[in-house]
């Protein structure tokens, strides 16, 4: 959840938010309605009904004022190298690690 950490730091630095005011939350979204076993979003070591096969992506939700969108967009793009990859991802590969931005 490196991206959440980066946005928490940005909330503190850009918006001067305290720990009690932070809004960065992580989760998974955007997947199919369910899997053969009926689980919509479930993950375990055995990879039963894993996020990737369900079509979900890791997400970070934030509540930021529109006046700060540009600064947060700059923060987000700093996470990527010149080829569009995130150096912190290491072995995290697959559709659940795709990069999305939504408003």
Image (spheres, rainbow, N blue to C red):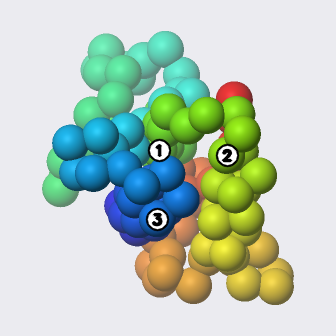
Q: Secondary structure at mark 2?
A: helix
The image shows residue 43 at horizontal and vertical percentages of: 25, 43
Q: Is residue 52 visible?
A: no
Q: Is residue 2 above or below residue 67?
A: below
**Label 3 to label 2: alpha-carbon separation:** 12 Å
User: In screen coordinates, is 14 left or right of 27?
Assistant: right
Category of crowding for the residue at label 1, using alpha-carbon neighbours closer than 10 angstroms: few (below 14), some (14–19), many (at least 20): some
Q: Which residue is mark 1?
A: 60
Q: Which mark is residue 13?
A: 3
Residue 59 vs residue 9, the one in the foreground: 9
**Label 1 to label 2: alpha-carbon separation:** 16 Å
Picture quarter with the N terminus: bottom left
The image shows residue 72 at horizontal and vertical percentages of: 65, 55
Picture quarter with the C terminus: top right
At a point 49% along the width and 14% down the height, the residue shown is 33
Q: Is residue 51 above or below residue 2?
A: above
Q: Is residue 11 above or below residue 69?
A: below
Q: Which mark is residue 68?
A: 2
Which residue is at the far right? 82
């Amino acid at each position: 959840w490196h991206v959440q950490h980066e946005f928490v730091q940005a909330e503190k630095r850009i918006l001067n938010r305290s720990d009690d005011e932070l809004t960065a939350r992580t989760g998974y979204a955007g997947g199919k309605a369910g899997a053969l076993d009926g689980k919509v979003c479930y993950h375990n070591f055995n990879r039963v009904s894993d996020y990737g096969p369900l079509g979900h992506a890791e997400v970070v939700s934030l509540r930021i004022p529109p006046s700060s969108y540009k600064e947060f967009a700059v923060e987000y793009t700093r996470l990527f190298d010149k080829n569009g990859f995130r150096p912190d991802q290491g072995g995290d590969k697959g559709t659940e690690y795709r990069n999305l931005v939504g408003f």
